[in-house]
Amino acid sequence: MAKKLFVGGLSWNTTEENLRKAFEEFGEVTEAKTILDRETGRSRGFGFVTFADSEAADAAVAKMNGNQLDGRTIRVNEANEPEPRGERRGGRREFGGGGGRNRY
């Protein structure tokens, strides 16, 4: 079964290709993704690696967590699945207590 890993502490110079190559020694990598800032296009310093096999992913966590990649010490652990977003409520948010100008 596939397993996704979170990789934090990446160098801004780490590419998806570098990330894939670093983790392929542990097994089949189905996806390697570095996360980029929407406005600047620059790396945000973290990414994800998905393995086809969970045992390969576990081996990668054991060997790669705390090791160096492109001159930076990286953190590697199992990725948490994002929680589904709740329904958005329309209208204005009420904060209470006022703020800004006081009106008499």
Image: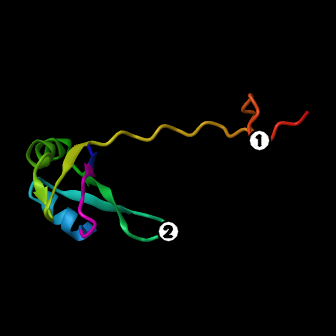
The quarter of the picture where residue 46 lies is bottom left
Q: Which mark sits nearer the N-terminus, 1 or 2? A: 2
Q: Secondary structure at mark 1?
A: loop
Q: Magenta part mainly helix, strand or loop? A: loop
Q: Residue at x 29, y 59 (%)?
A: 31
Q: Residue at x 23, y 51 (%)?
A: 52
Q: Amino acid at mark 1?
A: Gly
Reading the image, the residue beneath label 2 is 39
Q: Amino acid at mark 2?
A: Glu
Is residue 104 within the magenta segment? Answer: no
Residue 74 location in percent, x, y? 18, 52
Going by the image, does 76 lie left or right of 31? left
**Number of residue marks:** 2
- CA gap, disc 1 and disc 2: 27 Å
Residue positioned most to the top: 97
Reading the image, the residue beneath label 1 is 90
Residue 1 location in percent, x, y? 26, 43
For the magenta stretch, what is the residue range?
7-13
